[in-house]
Amino acid sequence: MEGKVTLDKVIAFLRVYLTFACCWPLPPNATKLQRLVRSAFQCFCLTNSIVLAIAAVWTLYKHSDNVLLVMKLGCQLSAIVQVPLQLILFTMQNKRLQFIILEMESYYQRAQEYEKEIIQQYVDKCKLFYGIILCWLAMTGISVIMTPLFSSQSFPSEAEYPFDVQLQPLKTIIYAHHILIAYQCVIQVSTNTFPALLLWFVAARFDILSVRFRTTTNINELIKYTREHSLLLRYAREVTRAIRYVALLCVTFSTGAVIFGYLTFMSRQPWSVKWTFLMIAFCGFVELYMYAWPADNVMSMSTNIASAVYESLWYSDDLIMRKVLVHIILRSQHPVTVSVPCALPNLSMNYYASYISTVFSYMAFVRIMMGQE
């Protein structure tokens, strides 16, 4: 049991692994020094990513007629621009995320044995997939960093600067800067495991509550579970509000990474270059899946409460209990969703399937247009 991956171990791992992304909130009792260090580190990460983004945009403006360079820098920019934007979005939701994390840790500490078993089932179901994704992201970052060893370019990114970069120690500094940006991009995409963890936890709690409703035997238990349902719905809404704009950001920039990465892969480039951009394009596909899978489960489990209530022994009890159960059934008809009005529909596996179809259509259209030119 000591080597088993449990929820508390997942939380501890992500808290450390995602340090560079500055997405995990500080505890409410953090000292002024801790807050100051965190703010300084956020400013450093923000500045570091913006500098390369500006250099890449300037290069695109300067070489807008070079289609291949535009595709390669467009793919890299899709990852680089996510870094400052995602950092800002998580900072804006800091207090809300503090509450969400504290509630999750508190609930797990107070959970009964059967509740921990249900949560463990979710951990066991997800750990292999997310572990493979984190490894793939790390391999992609290493591939980007190693690109100059197998090509004629001097740095991992082909962004240009308005000064001579071949002089030492400036060349070494810029290379280190690019390596740090590659690491930031890897960690920032890996940050999507954090919202995914929150969504899986919400789904597990709805699953636990369904078990309780199915086994309820008296009005006192029913009232208790009804209150828990209300609190859980509020908690779920807090989670979706905290992550929905991060999910929208993921959808937007993963599309760019997939399209530009695919087009670069289809161009006449050495396989050392093609392989790197194919890996980036694949990261774009799985980045959204990291959200869609748990979001779809939250939708299902939040509506399954109605089925659990209907399967309880409601028909053999008094009228008051029946009215309460009917109220819960009606309330459960509205699933908990991750969405942004007028921008992001309900995030689910159906949406992910339509997203893939749309992205492939875009790729085919852009390739035809490039062929005509």
Image (tube, rainbow, N blue to C red):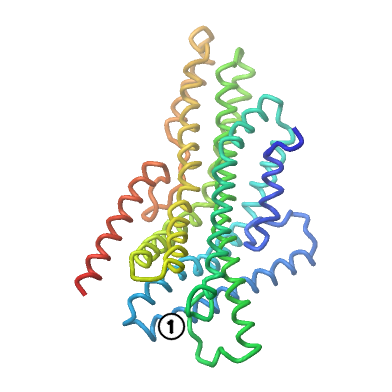
Task: Name the quadrant containing residue 61.
Answer: bottom left
Quadrant position of the C terminus in the picture: bottom left
Q: Residue at x 44, y 55 (%)?
A: 282
Can you say whether 141 is above or below 51 in the image?
Answer: above
Vertical order, 128 against 69 (above or below): above
Q: Residue at x 46, y 61 (%)?
A: 280
* Residue 196 percent coordinates (x, y): 55, 46
Who is closer to the viewer here, 267 or 315?
A: 267
User: How crowded is the residue under tag 1: few (<14 C-alpha within 10 Å), some, or many (20+)?
Assistant: some
Which quadrant is home to the N terminus? Answer: top right
Q: Nearer the viewer, residue 127 or 122?
A: 127
Picture quadrant where residue 173 is located: bottom right
Question: Could you tell me how many numbered marks the image carries?
Answer: 1
Q: Secondary structure at mark 1?
A: helix
The image quadrant that residue 108 belongs to is: top right
Q: Residue at x 48, y 80 (%)?
A: 152
Question: In percent of the image, x 71 and y 43: which residue is there?
Answer: 9
Q: Foreground: 199 or 35?
A: 199
The image shows residue 17 at horizontal and vertical percentages of 67, 56
Amino acid type, label 1: Thr
| Residue at far top of view | 316
Q: Is residue 5 visible?
A: yes
Residue 279 left/right relative to 217:
left
Residue 166, position as x, y percentages in the image: 57, 89
Question: Can the viewer see residue 88 in this picture?
Answer: no
Q: For this view, does 223 lie left or right of residue 355?
A: right
46 vs 262, left or right, is: right
Q: What residue did someone put label 1 on?
A: 59
Residue 185 location (% of width, % of height):
55, 65
